[in-house]
Image: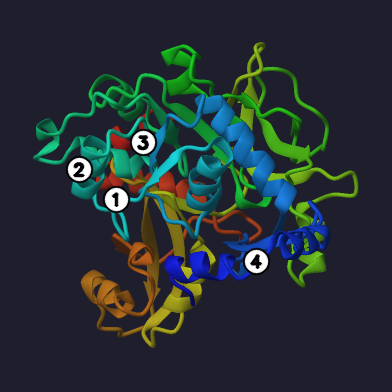
């Protein structure tokens, strides 16, 4: 690896002719970034993103925020996500804005300090990051008056959190964005001058030069305004495909070029979208995609577990938390805590089930398929998660 200073030193070794020669070898549609994202099975897939994919998305995202060279963007989100590398750093480069990196990894205190001392005009974050900042005991000690805009994205955004970011942090022109890595990543975004109601209850309108349609998952027919359908998108910002995975690419992008997101949404008469659910069996915990099958397959390695089903249950802080329903083998001597201990240090911390339920059976259809939606409903009742389940999100 090179340090930043090494890169600057090497720039001095190349002349204008060298630069022109390199530029002539580049094409806007060349793949420049293979961004790994998990699929419905939890197996990583490399989304092949081009120069045009990324630069266009960064341009449109920043335009929606009204970014220019006077802005100073605080970027506490990781650069290995599209949130950091496209909506954050590349957005800043395209618009000539200053990048402020508060810490090597997210820290609410360092983020607040950076906004205050560097007079940041914009800040990005997933909802849990904003919740951590708003709830920090030293929050009132920082002057955040410079804040104007930013993006809250990565997982469903609780409406009340959005209101607090506007009212208490002063980011009165902050936006909400929706997308996925395969779309480079943003598909829809609210505008800085949208009403607060629009910005707290929807994920905005489609970006320029982007097509979106809502399709009935069963009939594949377009749905009417106000009806729920799978959100599909088509544009020059959709990935070229998954690296060395032609079958997975064909599953994700149909012959007409539509990317099937697996997310359910509605749209109103003014073109504002609201995400209402997911076709994919996925949990979004604090902006991290957690695939139940991956955790299930790991728990199957436990010698005393006979069967396991992993679901997401509502959580006021992280949006969703991981829960495992576990059926033990006969005469097994296992506790809920010992199952969590089995996971710790062996899978990512955010994948360790917060809740474990020991059970003799799972709710099933007559054909033997596990009904996870019934498991979730029952878990909400048993765990008393009604307040979290009723949190309104965009």
Q: Position of residue 313 (x, y in %)?
A: 38, 48
Spatial separation of the CA atoms under disc 1 and disc 4: 30 Å
Q: Position of residue 51 (x, y in %)?
A: 71, 52
Q: Is residue 42 visible?
A: no
Spatial separation of the CA atoms under disc 2 and disc 3: 33 Å
The residue positioned 47% from the left and 50% from the top of the image is 84
The relative height of residue 13 versus residue 174 in the rendered view (above or below) is below
The residue positioned 61% from the left and 59% from the top of the image is 369
Q: Position of residue 187 (x, y in %)?
A: 64, 36
Spatial separation of the CA atoms under disc 3 and disc 4: 31 Å
State the scheme by which the image is colored.
Answer: rainbow
Q: How many neighbours does mark 1 have within 10 angstroms: few (below 14), some (14-19), or many (20 or more)?
A: many
Return the disc, 2 or 4, that comes first in the chain's sequence: 4
Return the disc, 1 or 4, that comes first in the chain's sequence: 4
Q: Mark 2 against mark 4, which lies toward the viewer? A: 2
Left of 192 or right of it: where is 186? Answer: right
The residue positioned 24% from the left and 23% from the top of the image is 145
Q: How many neighbours does mark 3 have within 10 angstroms: few (below 14), some (14-19), or many (20 or more)?
A: some
Mark 4 = which residue?
45
Mark 1 = which residue?
102
Label 1 secondary element: loop
Q: Mark 2 against mark 3, which lies toward the viewer? A: 2
Return the disc, 3 or 1, that comes first in the chain's sequence: 1
Spatial separation of the CA atoms under disc 2 and disc 4: 36 Å
Mark 3 = which residue?
389
Label 4 secondary element: strand
Return the disc, 1 or 2, that comes first in the chain's sequence: 1
C-beta proximity under 8 Å, tags 1 and 2: yes
Q: How many neighbours does mark 4 have within 10 angstroms: few (below 14), some (14-19), or many (20 or more)?
A: many
Mark 2 = which residue?
113
The relative height of residue 295 versus residue 333 in the rendered view (above or below) is above
């Amino acid at each position: 690896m090179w340090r930043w200073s090494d890169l600057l030193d090497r720039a001095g070794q190349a002349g204008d002719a060298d630069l022109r020669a390199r530029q002539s070898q580049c094409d806007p549609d060349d793949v420049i970034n293979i961004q790994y994202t998990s699929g419905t099975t939890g197996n990583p897939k490399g989304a092949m993103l081009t120069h045009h994919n990324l630069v266009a998305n960064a341009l449109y995202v920043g335009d929606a925020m009204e970014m220019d060279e006077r802005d100073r963007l605080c970027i506490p989100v990781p650069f290995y996500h599209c949130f950091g590398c496209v909506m954050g750093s590349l957005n800043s480069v395209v618009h000539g804005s200053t990048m402020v990196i508060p810490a090597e990894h997210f820290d609410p205190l360092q983020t607040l300090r950076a906004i205050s001392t560097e007079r940041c005009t914009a800040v990005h974050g997933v909802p849990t990051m904003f919740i951590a900042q708003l709830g920090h005991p030293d929050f009132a000690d920082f002057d955040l008056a410079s804040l104007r805009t930013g993006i809250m994205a990565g997982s469903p955004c609780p409406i009340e959190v959005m209101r607090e970011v506007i009212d208490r942090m002063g980011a009165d022109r902050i936006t909400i964005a929706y997308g996925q890595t395969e779309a480079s990543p943003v598909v829809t975004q609210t505008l800085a001058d949208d009403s607060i109601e629009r910005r707290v209850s929807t994920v905005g309108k489609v970006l320029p030069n982007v097509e979106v349609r809502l399709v009935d998952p069963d009939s594949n027919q377009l749905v009417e305004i106000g009806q729920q359908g799978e959100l599909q998108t088509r544009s020059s910002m959709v990935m070229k495909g998954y690296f060395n995975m032609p079958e997975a690419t064909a599953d994700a992008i149909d012959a007409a070029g539509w990317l099937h997101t697996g997310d359910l949404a509605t749209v109103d008469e003014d073109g504002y979208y609201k995400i209402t659910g997911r076709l994919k069996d996925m949990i979004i915990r604090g902006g991290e995609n957690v695939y139940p099958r991956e955790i299930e397959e790991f728990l199957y390695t436990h010698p005393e577990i006979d069967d396991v089903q992993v679901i997401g249950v509502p959580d006021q802080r992280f949006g969703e938390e991981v829960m495992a329903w576990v059926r033990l083998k006969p005469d097994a001597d296992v506790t809920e805590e010992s199952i969590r201990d089995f996971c710790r240090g062996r899978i990512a911390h955010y994948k360790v089930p917060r809740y474990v339920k020991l059970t003799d059976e799972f709710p099933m259809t007559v054909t033997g398929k596990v009904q996870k939606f019934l498991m979730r409903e029952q878990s909400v009742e048993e765990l008393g998660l009604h307040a979290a389940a009723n949190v309104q999100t965009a």
